[in-house]
Image: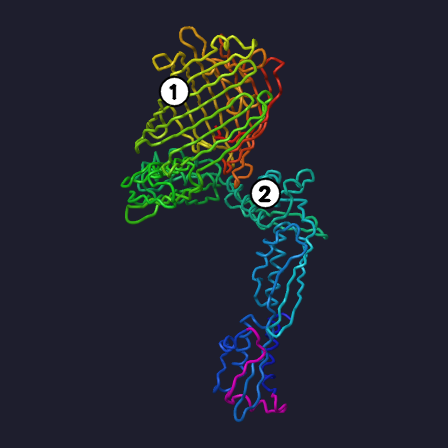
Amino acid sequence: MHTRTRLLTHLLAVFAMLCISAGTARADTAALIGRPVVAIDVAGHTTIEETTLRGAMSARVGDPLSDRAVADDVRKIFALGFFRDVVVEAEPDGDGVRLTYRVEELPNLSAVTFEGNDKVLEETLKGAAAGLTEGVFLAPDKLIKAREGLLDEYADAGFRRAQVVPVQVVTRSEGGDRVDLSFVIEEGDKTKIGIIRVEGNEAFSDRILKKRLKTRERFWLTSWITDSGIYKPAQVQDDLLRLEDYYQDHGYPEVVVSEPVSDLSADLRWQTLTYPVQEGRLYHMGEVRYEHAGKVPEAELTADLTVRAGNLYDRSAIRADRARITDVLGEHGYAFAQVTPDPVPRPEDGLMDIAFRVDEGEQVRIRRINISGNTKTRDKVIRREVRQQEGEIINTALLRRSFQRINNLNFFESIDIVPVEVGSGELDLDVKVKEKSTGQFSVGGGYSSVDGLVGLAEVTQGNLGGRGQTLSGRFERSGRRTVYNLRFQEPYLFDTTYSAGFDLFNTARDFESYEETRTGGSVTLGKSVGEYVSGALTYSLEAVDIKVLDATAPSIITSQAGSSTTGALGFSLTRDARDNFMDPTRGTRNVLAVEVADNALGGTNQFWKGSIESSAYLPLFKGSALSFRNLVGMGRGFGGKALPPGERYFVGGMRTVRGFGFGEAGPLATNGDPVGGPKEWVMSAELAFPLVAAANLKGALFVDWGAGFDDGQSFSTRDLNLTWGYEIRWISPLGPLRFGFGWVLDDQRPAAFQNGGEQLFTIGTFF
């Protein structure tokens, strides 16, 4: 019997129970009411303390017996949730009445199990069966609630046909009954959505509106892969908002989208969803006003806004303009400004007037910058990336830039910059970070038709001693190259805007007809100029050794075989305005680099090289970005000499023209050895898009054009190789991982060396 029904039955029978006497069956019940209670006994409990029962009673020894008081006691004892039955017995005791509260405890839950759950995890089911844990008293209402929770969980997962049957095995003992509870589940198949309709729509077709929905009709060819076409209540609720947003953004502010009408087939296998829509009338923008105190000139406040009189009513545009106005005010120090759009409809004209009511508040200064969460990284490493100082007027644009710079350190899992109002005209900036491991062991590899297997390993400490310095060692080995490199970088030399670093390296290139070994090092001194521009001066000194292996070596190699040295001075100027250097979605990067080698710099090789590289990133929809890259480089030896082999441009590979192996998109010897060229030209276009945003997993489609040009060969688009392909990218704990494939569309190599494409795999920074 249901608990509430049982309780009602007992309350109705309280008076009758009071008439039952253990000693006298024919006691005068009327004589018992009003007599003093001389004793109160409790019986039947095994695990519940007597004090708990007595604490729920209002009847007291010495009080006159009242049927209302006893009924209240029964109600309160049931409310404790420990008992399945409560009986009150009354018997005369001299001139008074003795009361006995006799209880029967609910069984104690010893275990909960699930049988038949193949499609839903047991942990999920335990969460859905709320309140059923080992040691609780198993009340009927808890069991009913748990079963309903399990059915709801299955319905949310699309299993509308699921059946759940609770099975109880009770063990009786002197210490109280114990029960093992098992939910036997028959999951059945998912209920599939056969038809989705929109009802009441005149302005937009069903096809247009259904594209806005995340819920889809079942399609036999793809739904089994994408798990679409399944009824999911939470997703359907989100779809109501999606439909409303679409109407609100296309001129219908009065739209009402009601709960969808669900029509299930008799066997619960198929479902039809009908979304009722009341569109209301179409509105255009009427008068647009800005009501403010003039602390920021209106021309500046409204310069980039898009809401204009005569446009269709667009709620998203109104929200975007509100955000832009707030940003402009924030850039002028009004960090707590309030901007409220106030739409006023004129139905007779089909116009919606908008008044942006602006409360600038006070201009705010930064009192203190507080940094927390950094257990390893020193405060100054974070503080020097914050683009504002204590005592300055707040500028929200500089705060956004501060976030970008701290994020680009790549030392932290999460970063929050929170303005906290501390008084009139003052705030504190709370910079909260959560550190991540900055020591990395990275591995990568790939396959080239010429190089064969390519492997690399790199050990990096990106935040050495918490000072923001970088120390890395790299080893790379392939059929053609062996690279050892040790690098150190100090981004803020002596806490100034200067940077410094050094490289020690040994590089060997092994080809069929020759091999080249370069051993040396370099020292770099850099300087930041403004927010986005930096310059660097590098001196390098290296020993070069070229060995000819057979007669097929090209003349550019044989003419410079032997040992030589290169002392070079290089200068680069970089403007980097990307939002994230590892995975940018907006901004630009431009680099101008020049290098000169001469006897006066300590070497025997004499040449010059120069390059210009430009990249642009344009954000698109839902985290996607379109990027373009253009790289041009050229060099020449002094005194009519050719550019030394090790300084030539080897085009082809992951960072130049994907789909070609190292150097394969440039000049080749007759045996297929890449020999590099004195000029290079590389262009790329790429669309990157999220696959699984939560896991930092992305996909990319690319098109690359490029070539290395030989001596005497001019830059020409006719000589560019063309490739296209895809990449899968994952910002993993080991670093950014890339793999994919590049196909060659236009191959300028001799037919004997053409192979159609190449696999891609590496761990390294995205460009």
Considering every residue shown, the one lying at the far right of the view is 267
| Residue 167 sits inside the magenta stretch | no
| Residue 29 sits inside the magenta stretch | yes
Q: Is residue 165 above or below residue 754?
A: below
- Judged from the image, the secondary structure of the residue bearing numbered disc 2 is loop
Q: Looking at the image, can residue 1 be seen?
A: yes
Considering every residue shown, the one lying at the far left of the view is 391
Q: Amino acid at mark 2?
A: Lys
Image location (x, y in percent) of residue 67: 54, 83
Crowding at dot 2, Cα within 10 Å, few <14 / some 14-19 / many 20+, comes out as: some
Between the residue at mark 2 and the residue at mark 1, the CA separation in whole angstroms equals 57 Å
Image location (x, y in percent) of residue 445: 55, 29
The disc at residue 214 is: 2
Image location (x, y in percent) of residue 184: 68, 58
Q: Nearer the viewer, residue 618 or 61?
A: 61
- Judged from the image, the secondary structure of the residue bearing numbered disc 1 is strand
Q: Between label 2 and label 1, give the one nearer the viewer.
A: 1
**First of labels 2, 1 by sequence position:** 2
The disc at residue 586 is: none
Q: Residue 636 is drawn in which quadrant?
A: top left
Looking at the rendering, the stretch of residues picked out in magenta corresponds to 21-47
Q: Amino acid at mark 1?
A: Ser
Image location (x, y in percent) of residue 752: 63, 14
Q: Which residue is mark 1?
A: 540
Crowding at dot 1, Cα within 10 Å, few <14 / some 14-19 / many 20+, comes out as: many
> Is 555 left or right of 264, judged from the image as shown?
left
Q: How is the image coloured?
A: rainbow
Q: Looking at the image, can residue 363 be seen?
A: no
Q: Is residue 22 above or below residue 343?
A: below
Q: Nearer the viewer, residue 641 or 160?
A: 641
